[in-house]
């Protein structure tokens, strides 16, 4: 354990080193606020966690001077998305021509998080503690004053002027704080697996809908990352059957994979995302703020989870950096203002996701024998790029785009001052 890791007080303790926690930690540390980020895992290498970095996040990376480093990460740029509905291709989303970024980047999340961690480690104010899990809150006089921590070296208490829970959809701190989330339900779960890609395969990233099945194929150059939708709760029954059933359905939907069907070797190669859509009624209590998935788990529709988590982090940093740096106590009204700012865009996107789940996904998964059809009016409208720009702008940039207003501190000791972008 390093010298900083033995400290048992932090100005701001951030629990969770996902997109929300790492971005918030970096922005605050860069503004000169001493932060401790606790991450329960030893690295960021997890199975597929979502890779879509949208234009709103590209803009943030630009504003803090990390765009060049980000562009060097292994990635694939996607500038439009198509659907193949009952064998008929339909363009749905088109980023081309949108300004200032006309694509989304598919980047392994661990590379993205490693990049943020690396930038943070160059700042003396950034204290990242890997394999340190928060197990509970310390509350005194009705206020959260720290967290209990379990690490390989010791169990200890970390006191902090503010705790920010960024510990994801199964948030320990949300439960510890007794905050209740409203569940909105989802008709589907998602099976994730990989299949090799061959040069003659389609180049696009696209969705396929046919006869009771839906699947999204993300082109990752040498492999396809496949999201296969199944009715909610059907995972156990599916896994009790032979893997051949899944292989056959995948090949029916994407016949070009026929020569590789054996690549899904067994159910062990398939992981399940239990889709959950929920939102906390209150994202805070005195001394505690929750953001990202801990405050609102998103449906995978639109691949917005990472990007909304980052937008929350930017909004939180903008509101918190100055008072934390000045050593002022953070009043709960500041935390309530962060919720007010972020709740509306989250709510609108969740409503759209829920409508798509009900009107499209439920219907497809329930009507196994029928070939689905895109209504003629929609087919006509989607011919126009201006129409296809609408979902691209909504999911790509979000509804209330955040910009970095936190300063880059002049007192950084590593000789590296990430750009001081203020808008
Ligand atoms: C299979 C899958 C595919 C997805 N695909 C996409 C996609 O393509 N695009 C997209 O935008 N979103 C996607 N998502 C959603 C996206 O990953 C999340 O919305 C996003 O990561 C939320 O960021 P976060 O920082 O709030 O939480 P998380 O990314 O969940 O990060 C939480 C972090 O907290 C850590 N942690 C948890 N508990 C503790 C604790 N007690 N103490 C210390 N650390 C703790 C966890 O290890 C984790 O690193 C996907 C999610 C899954 C599961």
Image (cartoon, rainbow, N blue to C red):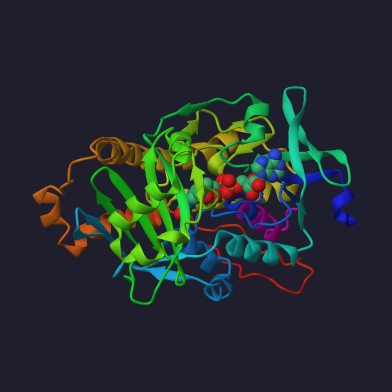
Give x and y (percent) for residue 195.
44, 62
Which of the two residues, 164 or 415, is positioned nearer the viewer here? Answer: 164
Majority secondary structure of magenta residues:
helix
**Image point (70%, 62%), residue name:** 120
As for residue 32 lying within the magenta part, the answer is yes
Give x and y (percent) for residue 100.
38, 69
**Image point (24%, 57%), residue name:** 84
Residue 315 can be seen in this image: no
Region in magenta: 23-34
**Image point (55%, 76%), residue name:** 72
Residue 417: name its quadrant.
Answer: bottom right
Q: Is residue 33 left or right of residue 54?
A: right
Residue 255: name its quadrant.
Answer: bottom left
Image quadrant where one finds the N terminus = bottom right
Residue 395 can be seen in this image: yes
Give x and y (percent) for residue 219.
41, 66
As for residue 137 lying within the magenta part, the answer is no
Give x and y (percent) for residue 5.
85, 52
Which of the two residues, 384 or 164, is positioned nearer the viewer here? Answer: 384
Q: Tag count in the figure? A: 0
Residue 190: name its quadrant.
Answer: top left
Q: Is residue 52 left or right of residue 323?
A: left
Relative to residue 198, is residue 390 depicted above or below?
above
**Image point (58%, 71%), residue name:** 65
Which of the two residues, 87 or 276, is positioned nearer the viewer here? Answer: 87
């Amino acid at each position: 354990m390093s010298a900083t890791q033995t400290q048992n007080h932090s100005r701001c303790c951030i629990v969770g080193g996902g997109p929300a926690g790492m971005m918030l930690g970096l922005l605050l540390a860069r503004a000169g606020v001493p932060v401790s980020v606790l991450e329960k895992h030893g690295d960021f290498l997890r199975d597929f966690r979502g890779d879509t970095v949208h234009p709103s996040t590209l803009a943030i990376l630009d504003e803090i001077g990390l765009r060049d480093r980000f562009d060097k990460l292994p990635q694939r740029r996607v500038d439009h998305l198509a659907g193949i509905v009952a064998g008929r291709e339909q363009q749905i989303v088109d980023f081309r021509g949108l300004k200032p970024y006309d694509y989304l980047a598919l980047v392994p999340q661990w590379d993205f998080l490693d990049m943020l961690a690396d930038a943070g480690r160059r700042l003396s104010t950034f204290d990242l503690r890997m394999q340190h899990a928060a197990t509970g809150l310390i509350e005194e006089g009705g206020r959260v004053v720290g967290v209990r921590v379990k690490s390989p070296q010791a169990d200890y208490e970390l006191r902090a002027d503010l705790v920010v829970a960024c510990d994801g959809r199964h948030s320990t701190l949300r439960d510890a704080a007794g905050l209740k989330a409203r569940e909105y339900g989802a008709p589907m779960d998602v099976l994730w697996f990989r299949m090799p890609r061959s040069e003659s395969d389609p180049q696009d990233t696209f969705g396929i809908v046919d006869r009771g099945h839906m699947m999204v194929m993300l082109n990752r150059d040498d492999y396809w990352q496949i999201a296969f939708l199944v009715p909610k709760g059907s995972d156990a029954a599916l896994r009790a059957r032979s893997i051949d059933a899944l292989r056959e359905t995948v090949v029916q939907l994407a016949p070009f994979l026929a020569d590789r069907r054996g690549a899904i070797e067994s159910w062990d190669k398939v992981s399940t995302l239990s889709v959950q859509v929920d939102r906390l009624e209150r994202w805070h209590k005195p001394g505690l703020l929750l953001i990202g998935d801990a405050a609102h788990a998103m449906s995978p529709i639109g691949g917005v989870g990472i990007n909304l988590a980052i937008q929350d982090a930017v909004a939180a940093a903008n509101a918190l950096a100055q008072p934390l740096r000045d050593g002022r106590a953070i009043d709960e009204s500041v935390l309530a203002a962060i919720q007010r700012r972020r709740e509306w865009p989250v709510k609108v996107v969740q409503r759209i996701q829920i409508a798509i789940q009900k009107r499209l996904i439920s219907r497809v998964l329930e009507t196994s024998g029928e070939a689905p059809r895109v209504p003629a009016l929609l087919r006509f409208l989607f011919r126009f790029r201006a129409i296809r720009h609408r979902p691209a702008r909504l999911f790509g940039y979000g509804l209330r785009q955040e910009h970095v207003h936190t300063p880059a501190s002049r007192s950084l000791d590593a000789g590296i001052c990430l750009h001081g972008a203020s808008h």
